[in-house]
Amino acid sequence: MRASVNVKTFDGLFEELSTKARDRPEGSGTVAALDAGVHAQGKKVLEEAGEVWLAAEHETDDKLAEEISQLLYRTQVIMLGRGLTLEDVYKYL
Ligand SMILES: N=c1c2ncn([C@@H]3O[C@H](COP(=O)(O)OP(=O)(O)OP(=O)(O)O)[C@@H](O)[C@H]3O)c2ncn1[C@@H]1O[C@H](COP(=O)(O)O)[C@@H](O)[C@H]1O
């Protein structure tokens, strides 16, 4: 894939969401997801994981990539909700 200045990365998204969690801008879905609590956040992770699985079996590469991006997002919401940093996770990679 060709590099692009506009492509978000996992780290870049985490920084963006951390700022949203701190500043709590109006209309942010991330702020709403954080306020909904860990139970709701966990359900979203499971839902997106299931959609990744189904897309891998039945959908196009692009649809699969979209579902994976949503799973990454929902994973980051869980991380932020629990106060985990990227380093907390990366040390296990
Ligand atoms: N990457 C994402 C992202 N992926 C998924 N989602 C959310 O997840 C939804 C899709 O999930 P579902 O399939 O469950 O869709 P849905 O059932 O219609 O959603 P709900 O009604 O359950 O909210 C989207 O409509 C978004 O609300 C995301 N929301 C935000 N981001 C990124 O987070 C940044 C901050 O977002 P805000 O906090 O909303 O400003 C954005 O710039 C994006 O880059």
Image (tube, helix red, strand yellow):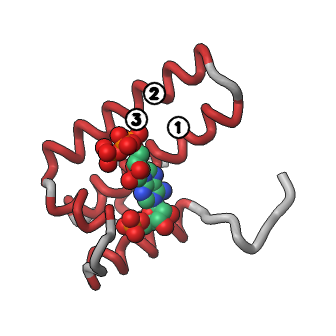
Q: Position of residue 38 (x, y in %)?
A: 15, 49
Cβ of mark 2 under 8 A from ligand 1: yes
Left or right placement of residue 28 versus residue 2 in this view: left
Q: Is residue 32 above or below residue 93?
A: below
Amino acid marked by disc 1: Glu
Q: Are marks 1 and 3 in contact (CB under 8 Å)?
A: yes
Residue sitting at 35 percent across and 74 percent down? 18
Cβ of mark 3 under 8 A from ligand 1: yes
Q: Position of residue 28 (x, y in %)?
A: 32, 69
Q: For marks 1 and 3, give the CA distance.
A: 7 Å
Q: Which residue is mark 3?
A: 48
Query: Within the image, what quadrant is residue 9 found in?
Result: bottom right
Residue sitting at 61 percent across and 32 percent down? 64
Residue sitting at 28 percent across and 85 percent down? 23
Amino acid marked by disc 2: Glu
Q: For marks 3 and 2, give the CA distance.
A: 5 Å
The quadrant of the picture showing ligand 1 is bottom left
Observer able to see residue 91: no
Q: Which residue is mark 2?
A: 51
Task: Determine crowd level at label 3: few under 14, some 14-19, many 20+ residues with C-alpha closer than 10 A.
Answer: many
Q: Are marks 3 and 2 in contact (CB under 8 Å)?
A: yes
